[in-house]
Amino acid sequence: MPLSPTLTQVTDRIIERSAQARQTYMDRMKRAADEGPRRAHLTCGNQAHAYAAMGDDKGALAAGRAANIGIVTAYNDMLSAHQPFATYPDRIKAAARAKGGTAQVAGGVPAMCDGVTQGQVGMELSLFSRDVIALAAGVSLSHNTYDAAIYLGVCDKIVPGLVIAAATFGYIPALFLPAGPMTSGLPNDEKARVRQEFATGECNRDDLMAAEMASYHGPGTCTFYGTANSNQMLMEFMGLHLPGSSFVNPNTPLRDALTDYGAERALEITALGNDYRPASQVLDEKAFVNGMVGLMATGGSTNLLLHLPAMARAAGVHITTEDFADLSHVVPLMTKVYPNGLADVNHFHAAGGLGYVIGDLLDQGLLHDDVTTVAGDTLSDYTQEPKLRDGKLSFEAGTKTSFNDKILRPATDPFQTTGGVSHMHGNLGSGVMKVSAVAPERRIIEAPARVFQTQEAVKKAFQAGEFTSDTVVVVRFQGPKSNGMPELHNLTPVLAVLQDRGLKVALVTDGRMSGASGKVPAAIHVAPEAAQGGPLSKLQDGDMVRVDAEAGTLDVLDVSVLDRPAATPDLSDNGHGVGRELFQVFRDTVGDADSGAGVVV
């Protein structure tokens, strides 16, 4: 089938918009690649320092004829998704050595868990950790001794930060190896029910703790379709993973085989071989368009609407919220995975997974097939599934049929005909809403505003019984310049309870919601943010606000409100405690949410 006209139009305008920046970037990458293998430019003393602890690999490293892989790892054993990475470096080194190459741990990057910091002060460092990760990966690779890089990372800000680094070092190949999701535990809808019961006092903390521990119970990524698993989807759609590798469980023979083959493939695609695939060629305009399509088709995390523009800019590609919105109009929602449905990512993978989604979208002309990936020269390679046959890894044709149409449907019979994200714009600014989990009858609300500065204040008002009618809850001064743009995940149970009581409610904020945000309509990432005098800073309790996700509008009905002076709250407490002192320079220099809220790009 020919390409969708909308897909072509969006891609063409991104190419045109990015032409100068992309050419400058590619010229820079070419100059770096033309210099040849990195190690050739080190002195003997430089190299001796780099190889001193490498034992039997010293000879191969010093000769410089075999490729050397730099491993950038986000391992720590506090994150369940990253704990499996403890064994990866040794496996990668052994696999590389067996093929005549070498591998070294180039460095580690920080990896924080938003599940641990939800509702806590530490969450104010979360978004900025993406830029710290990019910087740390840059330091790791700056030793200039690597012919390819393997990136070990999964969760929310970690993959985007690593992709920014991969683009920056785009003259060498980049291959991402995931850890996979934990096995299924307590069903996600049951966990959500207990959370709502705790919010209303119907169960105690022991009950809540038991439910949470039964849900998050072992090594691997959390099983709901939040930001971490949306990242894994993105790496396949953009050709940085091996085909079909995202949702293979940790500590299984297939997972180990994929890790070994990832090392082998990284050696094959260096400039020293015959299949050179630098990251700069993989990370082009079409790859980012494919990533946006994947986000829409799977109803992924709204956090990627911040991360994708930042990742793209590192590769000289400029994408906007309008690009997301236009693609959302033509890309159908093909999946129902929690919070958009009852299934988790293990059920999704069993039903046909990403290979099925990619294949079906290709058949409908909704993806670019002619792209460079770490696996080959077409995205069609990602319709394959990895299999272990007699202990050997092979990639075989994936299913063209969904094994569960309550989880996964074809693009011609989707859960909804448009994608999972709506671009919101109006006299209150520009934002986004994840609509894939919001019932159609809840997508339009016109009601008086209640204005808050913190999510804690919203919870106190709820506990005091102050919400008795339809309400648009406005939580402002939560943008990147105010406090680092923490997720406001703790609002989800409270607002869901109000909804279940029959009220129409919506959230409007210049902050973020969790990648697991669900059934409550939430216009988020609103820019300009209130701290910059944006329209949200003019609102007062009682102002009539209309949130219309169908039309994509976000307005205060009385436009004279916008003539009021901006509220100027005291934000001084946001600058200290739990490391916030170290990040003032980030708050001072961060970009707007609609351009990715970036610091380093």
Image: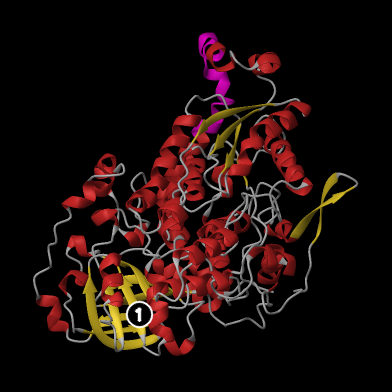
The residue drawn where x is 52% and y is 25% is 144
Indicate the position of residue 43 as horizontal and vertical percent values. Answer: 52, 12
Q: Between 524 and 473, which is closer to the camera in this rendering? A: 473
Q: Between 123 and 589, which is closer to the camera in this rendering? A: 123
Indicate the position of residue 377 as horizontal and vertical percent values. Answer: 69, 52
Q: Between 97 and 205, which is closer to the camera in this rendering? A: 205
Within 10 Å of disc 1 (Cα), the crowding (few <14, some 14-19, many 20+) is many
The question of residue 32 being in magenta is answered with yes
Indicate the position of residue 12 as horizontal and vertical percent values. Answer: 49, 64
Vertical placement of 539 versus 291: above or below? Answer: below
Residue 551 seen in render = no
The region drawn magenta spans: 31-47
The residue drawn where x is 73% and y is 70% is 351
The question of residue 529 being in magenta is answered with no
The residue drawn where x is 10% and y is 76% is 563
Q: Quadrant of residue 297?
A: bottom right
Give SS at disc 1: strand
Vertical placement of 532 versus 601: above or below? Answer: below
Amino acid type, callout 1:
Ala
User: Which quadrant of the figure contains the N terminus?
Assistant: bottom right
Q: Which residue is mark 1?
A: 506
The total number of labels drawn is 1
Q: In the image, 540: left or right of 522?
A: left
Q: In the image, 535: left or right of 63?
A: left
Residue 425 seen in render = yes
